Amino acid sequence: MLAIFQAAGWPIWLLLIASIVATALIIERLLYLRRSKILPKKLLDEVVQVYRGGKADIGVIDKLEKSSPLGVVLSAALRNVDAPREVMKESIEEAGSGVAHTLERFLTTLGTIATLAPLMGLFGTVVGMIEIFGSQNATGSNPAQLAHGISVALYNTGFGLAIAMPTLVFYRHFRALVDSFVIEMEQQAVKFVDIVHSKRK
């Protein structure tokens, strides 16, 4: 493996760093963006029971807020349970936008790597082409330098594409996942608002 990196020249180290960062971010997001962690199954039912039982004190709300991203949204609703419907929905939207920002963490970096990796590979290709042209002189060409230039050009292009393709796939997957989580959180919060205000009517 080290022989490949040596053949690919110094531009490959930039791609290696990008691949390590991308891999770390993908693993972190895979562990964090789990449905069971973001949207616990029976949390809405538990919150409704707490509300109907009149047990929604500060301690319970704080515990709910720390439990999960959905808990953050529902705790905002519980804090404004005595407010008009519009105020309650507004507090949910504000909490939801904060949660969405947390869920989207590192996705910009992942998208940047997916976009930048082919360009970094292209940069390595240009460096390799420069070496190829540098191998030409009045007496002909230096075969060793020519071969090294070709290696630099091809390895960097290949590595750039190999990093960009899976990174782009995961970036798109995570974006879609976050969007679906945010929509589902909003739907569950609106259900809770409907339960609270229909009870008052």
Image (tube, helix red, strand yellow):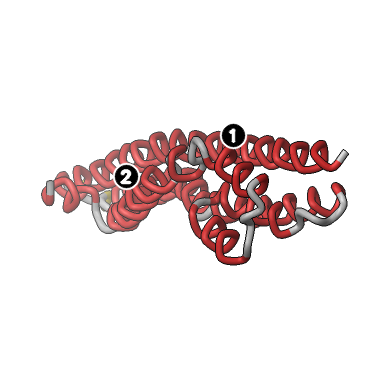
Determine whether label 2 and label 1 are within 8 Å by CB.
no
Residue 68, position in %: x, y? 50, 51
Q: Is 195 positioned to the left or the right of 45 in the image?
A: right
Q: Residue furthest front?
A: 53
**Marker count (numbered):** 2
Residue shown at 63% from the left, 40% from the top: 185
**Left or right of 35, for residue 75:** right
How would you rate the neighbour count of disc 2 (Cα within 10 Å): few for under 14, some for 14-19, many for 20 or more?
many
- Left/right of residue 102 with respect to residue 161 in the rendered view: right
Q: Amino acid at mark 2?
A: Asn
- Disc 1: which residue: 180
Dot 2 falls on a residue whose secondary structure is helix
Viewer-side residue, 103 vs 20: 103
Helix, strand or loop at mark 1: helix
Question: Looking at the image, is 57 positioned above or below residue 181?
Answer: below
- Residue in front for this viewpoint, 103 or 46: 46
Residue depicted at x 76% and y 57%:
80
At a point 58% along the width and 38% down the height, the residue shown is 45
Cα separation, mark 2 vs mark 1, equals 36 Å
Depicted 172 relative to depicted 144: above or below:
above
Where's the C terminus, which quadrant?
Answer: top right
- Disc 1: CA contacts within 10 A as few (<14), some (14-19) or many (>=20): few
Q: Nearer the viewer, residue 196 or 1?
A: 196
Q: Residue furthest bottom?
A: 58
**One can see residue 185 in this view:** yes
Relative side of 32 to 189, left or right: left
Q: Which residue is denoted by mark 2 in the rendering?
A: 156
